[in-house]
Image (spheres, grey):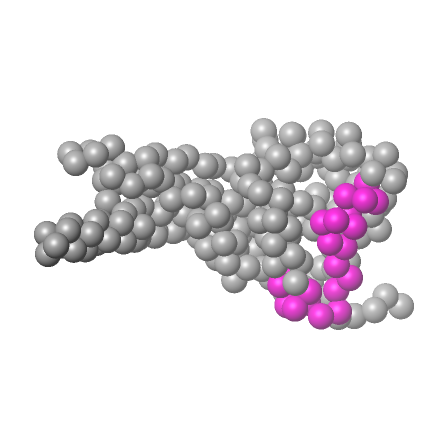
Amino acid sequence: MRRVLLGKFAFLIISVASLSSCTTHDTRTYTDPSIGTRTILSIAILPVRNAPIAQSESIRMNRDIAQTVQRKNPGLHVLGPVEAVEKLNELHLVDDYDRYIVALAQSGIPNKETLYRIGQALGVDALMQGQIVGLSQQDGTGAWGRPGSTAFALRYSIVSIRDGMLLWETSEEMRKKRQSNFSSAPPLQEVLPEAVEKVLQTIPSFAFAAQKPK
């Protein structure tokens, strides 16, 4: 009986160890000096497209981003992801938006013409866009191998509708590694909230967001 209990105890230790993990991250943020002199009264937050995450996680991420932008800029008119997409659908601009996202992902540079057309249709001064730019997962490879790990990279940027100027950008690279070589890779739902939290900490305040146009 004692051996059975000891066996169960040892199994419990191994199970807990396989779930424990360590996390490292690298946050890089750019803020254009002109952000302190530009009048930004409204912003549209577009959702991350084609992301390999559950709908509930996407909704939570979009909500957290929108709420943080609003909290840091109380006078700013924020058009959330759901409203922005609904308006693009109504105005038949979804294809333009898709082309904009593809070009942005390939070059890292926003297409000014398409950006201006989308911004005018949405009635905003700036556009905020998120991208999942990297995801790799590796299960543990056994006694003499490596532990399970997940590497994830998330980027958010804010661009001016008027001239396509990049006003702010944050890139968050995060790696979560299990302690056990016998564990599977940490699931994305463990890594994503931590990465989003790091992004939230860097969201800027706009100098003139609280002012009303004359």
Q: Of residues 5 and 114, which is closer to you in this image?
A: 5
Residue that sits furthest to the left in the current view: 3
| The quarter of the displayed image where residue 79 is located | bottom right
* Residue 54 makes an appearance in the image: yes
Q: Is residue 32 visible?
A: no
| Membership of 170 in magenta stretch | no
- Point 67% across, 45% down: residue: 47
Q: Position of residue 19 (x, y in %)?
A: 31, 50
Q: How many marks?
A: 0
Residue at 75%, 59% in the rendered image: 78
Residue closest to the eye, 180 or 89:
180
Query: Does residue 17 appear left or right of residue 98 in this picture?
Result: left
Instruction: Classify residue 15 as left or right of residue 122.
Output: left
Q: Is residue 87 magenta?
A: yes
Quarter of the image that includes the C terminus: bottom right
Where residue 58 appears, x then y in whole percent? 61, 47
Report the residue at 74% width, 35% height from top: 97
Which x, y percent locates residue 39?
75, 61
Q: Main secondary structure of the magenta part?
A: helix
Q: Is residue 114 left or right of residue 13?
A: right
Residue placed most toward the observer, 49 or 28:
49
Displayed quadrant of residue 213: bottom right
What residue is rendered at 15% in x and 34% in y?
A: 144
Quadrant holding the N terminus:
bottom left
Residue 182: give x, y in percent of width and height. 25, 39
| Start-end of magenta stretch | 68-88
**Residue at the farthest front position:** 1
